[in-house]
């Protein structure tokens, strides 16, 4: 009886894992971009890390690379390096990074989506970088996070990246 319960649980989990592992980068991009921009409607995570004078939330496994300085901070998770750029002169409603991306004719955008609320503007995008490589970009106002990747975890990376960007707080924002 217990063995049958485990089998009935493991079969769907294994099928989901195989479907996710077999998803094309384009399918991963579409799902990740959609989930990332929807995330901006949730309450931001409470910051757990200081980067310069700012506070952000870093999901498990992420760390700030030693020697990182404002306005560019390097984040690390495993073998992946992320660049966090904070422009304090841009409000949370700024479309600057989005407008720069979509107006650049040298960029091949695979997937992009925006979310504009009354107090903030966010976007997520996947850009073709090189053969089998993609640049992942998320932004909320003047805060942008990007990385280059070639693996099939594009959707999870985009969601983690938006969690980080959405959690950004200045000294003045911190209670």
Image (cartoon, grey):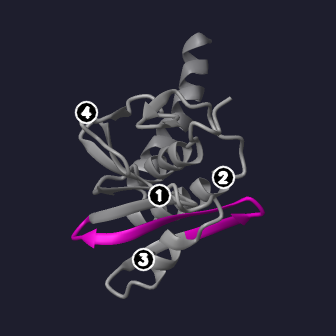
Q: Give the quadrant of the N terminus.
A: top right
Give the residue at mark 1.
87
Q: Residue at x 57, y 54 (%)?
A: 36
Q: Residue at x 47, y 57 (%)?
A: 87
Task: Specify the farthest residue to the bottom.
Answer: 105
Mark 3 or mark 2, whichever is nearer to me: 2
Label annotation for residue 109: 3
Q: Give the quadrant of the C terminus.
A: top right
Magenta: main secondary structure equals strand
Query: Callout 3 environment at 10 Å: few (<14), some (14 to 19), or many (20+)?
Result: some
User: What are the residue bounds of the magenta stretch?
Assistant: 113-132
Mark 1 / mark 2, whichever is N-terminal:
2
Instruction: Report helix, strand or loop for mark 1.
Output: loop
Mark 4 or mark 1, whichever is nearer to me: 1
Is residue 26 in view? yes
Image-based side of 39 in relation to 100, left or right? right
């Amino acid at each position: 009886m217990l063995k049958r319960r485990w089998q009935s649980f493991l079969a769907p989990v294994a099928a989901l894992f195989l479907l996710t592992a077999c998803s094309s980068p384009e399918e991963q991009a579409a799902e990740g971009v959609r989930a990332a921009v929807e995330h901006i409607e949730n309450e931001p995570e409470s910051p757990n890390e200081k980067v310069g004078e700012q506070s952000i939330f870093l999901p498990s496994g992420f760390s700030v690379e030693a020697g990182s300085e404002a306005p560019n901070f390097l984040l690390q998770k495993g073998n992946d390096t992320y660049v966090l750029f904070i422009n304090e002169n841009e409000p949370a409603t700024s479309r600057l990074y989005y407008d720069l991306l979509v107006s650049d004719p040298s960029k091949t955008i695979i997937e992009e989506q925006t979310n504009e609320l009354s107090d903030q503007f966010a976007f997520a995008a996947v850009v073709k970088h090189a053969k089998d490589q993609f640049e992942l970009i998320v932004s909320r106002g003047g805060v942008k996070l990007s990385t280059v990747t070639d693996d099939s975890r594009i959707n999870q990376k985009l969601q983690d990246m938006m969690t980080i960007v959405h959690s950004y707080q200045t000294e003045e924002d911190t209670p």
